[in-house]
Image (cartoon, helix red, strand yellow):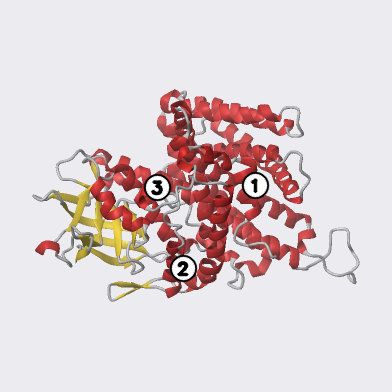
Amino acid sequence: MRSSLILSRRDLDFLLHEWLDVEGLVKRPRYAEHSRETFDAVLDLAEQIATEHFAPHNRTADENEPRMVDGRVEMIPEVKAALDVFVEAGLMAGEFDEEYGGLQLPHVVGQAVFAWFKAANVGTSAYPFLTMGNARLLLAHGSREQIDTYVRPEIEGRWFGTMALSEPQAGSSLADITTKAVPQDDGTYRLFGNKMWISGGDHELTENIVHLVLAKIPGGPPGVKGISLFIVPKVLVREDGSLGERNDVVLAGLNHKMGYRGTTNTLLNFGEGVHTPGGAPGAVGYLVGEPHRGLSYMFHMMNEARIGVGMGATVLGYTGYLHALEYARTRTQGRRAGGKDPSTPSAPIVEHADVRRMLLAAKSYAEGGLALGLYCARLVDEEQTAETEADRARAHLLLDTLTPIAKAWPSQWGPVADDLAIQVHGGYGYTRDYPVEQFYRDNRLNPIHEGTNGIQALDLLGRKVVAQGGAGLRLLGETVTATTARAAGTDWAGFAADLDAAVARLGSVTATLWGPGDPDLALANASVYLEAAGHVVVAWLWLEQALACEGSTEAFHEGKRAAARYFWRWELPRTRAQFDLLESLDRTVLDTDQTWL
């Protein structure tokens, strides 16, 4: 049977069962109805649906992106057909409570399941991805009435959801949003403003769309402290749950991007008066939680989305690697370096050392990123279900520290894996005849999605590693050195020693950067800090994987060891020069006047 070119089920089994011991979670009450058999069954189902219903229209959706026609969105019918299968299989509800029709799957299993859909068709998978995040936010911060009215239809897949943050003039600077929410006598609000870059913001895939919208109530505090969060449905909902009037939310246009073309990306106008619910203009909105706490609520969805974006970047790199590997094994060209006789048959290009270098690099990025994403998902399960409060708090702190890395590292190196996949294909790689050029275009959006990598860098260095007196960074260091201690006396002792040195350097460089007490100076090179920290973390996860392979000579495990050695010898050394630069407190970027550029 041919191996999938979407993802490696063997790798998922290794990460979930041989490394992360996901089966051990069934001892906890929330997952007591599960077993390895149920986890494997839902993974089998995901692979089947992704292969048969999502992957076949990936190219078609890319070539026939959604269009705005007479104020409505038109798209190819295969998108809805695939999503209907996804919903009918119960996959939208997978991780949710049984109370809402869910399967109560562990988050780490849910992430592995959804990885199949992101890798098969990232454009179509965006709709349930956003909807599940929207529902989880409302479960955490919404009222019982809001949960019953909006979350249940989302989990059932009858309605989809969005997050509406950015505005044309503000971008990522949410302090500068101007959408206002005017209180009404009946306890609702009327919203007026514009939102930009809203993925899934309009379509006819479902009978309703639940927008979660950031806006400011007049008279509230300035900046981010005055932001509130509102539910603004596309169609208003009557008390009995049936659909009523069209809300005053209007599709103003579609953004046409280089990738993710199957996902509608919209400019939405709220309250322009095209529709007049209740006889008046203004989009009817319902406050979530307390006024002026909207940004903290929205971060519940944003942080989840950041890890999800990292997973998407990983699996797009992964599928690119698998396609390149198959191509390299079947494409014959040239002869090995020592072969000079032109009459001998051409060799498969995988026999050329430089092609193996590219494949090994791509493998190390893809499989390293997948380990990072699933490790963070496992931390979510620990945060929510660990037996002791101390264990839950530890998982929360470590996850909080790793989140900017989990988003940004795969978003940087996943596209590199796809770039290498194009290179392995040679001249064919950048044509539409092979899918790797689309994987690269799709993946290039991820360094911008859910907060640019530069924003993640500011978050990591400016907040996460200094919060609580550096508690998160210390915990990360302790967690890594617990792994290196296990490697003592093994074939990986040298890797462990180099990793120990890198972890120590990360701590000392952090102290050096903040030593002068100058935030502008400390943060000027934050992106270099993020990249170095990310490489240290992924090196640690490669050591973890190498140790999990001990005792086996199976080709799969030998491949893991080869990728671990590659990351140790070729990738981890990058951090030395980066730490040198950071430690020098270089002012080149900070002191460059804009008139010189």
Tell which tag, 2 or 3, sits nearer the viewer. Answer: 3
**Numbered tag placed on residue 82 in the rendering:** 2
Instruction: Residue 221: name its quadrant.
Output: top left
Residue at the spot of label 1: 14
Bin the neighbour count of mark 1 within 10 Å (Cα to Cα): few under 14, some 14-19, many 20 and up. some
Mark in the foreground, 3 or 1: 3
Please indicate, yes or no, whether residue 526 appears anywhere in the rendered image.
no
Q: In which quarter of the image is the N terminus?
A: bottom right
Q: Residue furthest front?
A: 33
| Mark 2 neighbour class, 10 Å CA radius: few under 14, some 14 to 19, many 20 or more | many
| Mark 1, secondary structure of its residue | helix
Residue nearer the viewer, 57 or 418: 57
Where residue 448 sits: x, y (%)? 44, 52
Q: Earlier in the sequence, mark 2 or mark 3?
A: 2
At label 3, the amino acid type is: Asp
Report the amino acid beneath label 2. Answer: Ala
Query: Which mark is on residue 252?
Result: none
Hey, what amino acid is under mark 1? Answer: Phe
Tag of residue 97:
3
Q: Are marks 2 and 3 in contact (CB under 8 Å)?
A: no
- Whether residue 287 can be seen here: yes
The mark that comes first in sequence, 3 or 1, is 1
Q: Is residue 29 above or below residue 361?
A: above
Where residue 569 appears, as percent x and y from the top left, is 71, 40
- Helix, strand or loop at mark 2: helix
Q: Is residue 531 left or right of residue 593?
A: right
